[in-house]
Image: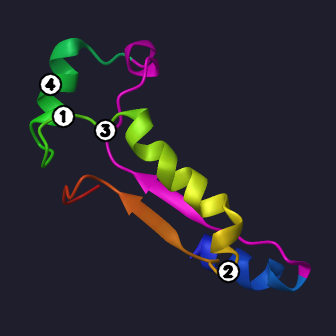
Amino acid sequence: MMARNLAQQLAEDGIRVNGVAPGFTYTPFLAAGGFTTESVKEISEGTFFRRPAQPAELAPLYVSVVDASSSYVSGEIYGNSGATPGF
């Protein structure tokens, strides 16, 4: 609702507001957050593809959100959970 409300408030100023809601994604920060190789494998078993998403798989979505060809899109949340329920 925050994205939708902000989009409505800022549309007159030509500002678009969108968001991306990714599922479990592998990054080097997982280890810094306390995730072990075993915990990553365990969480991945609960995903449709049995692995975490890779940042390169999400990047095109982020780029499309800000691309000029999406100039009429605002107030949307794009989910990218690899078809995994609950993410």
Dots 4 and 2: beta carbons under 8 Å?
Answer: no
Q: Are marks 2 and 1 in contact (CB under 8 Å)?
A: no
* Tag 1 near tag 3, CB within 8 Å: yes
Amino acid at the residue labelled 2: Asn
Residue 41, labelled with which disc? 4
Marks 1/3: CA–CA distance: 7 Å
Residue 83: name its quadrant: bottom left
Give the residue type at disc 3: Ala
* Numbered disc 1: secondary structure: loop
Of 71 and 79, nearer the camera is 71
Bounds of the magenta segment:
13-33
Residue closer to the observer: 52 or 71: 71
Disc number placed over residue 53 in the picture, else none: 3
Q: Is residue 40 above or below residue 82?
A: above
Q: How is the image coloured?
A: rainbow
Give 7 or 63, whichever is nearer the viewer.
63
Q: Position of residue 3 (x, y in %)?
A: 62, 71
The dot on residue 5 is: 2
Residue located at (29% from left, 55% from top) = 87
Q: Examine the rendered structure and indicate whether residue 66 appears above or below residue 30.
A: below
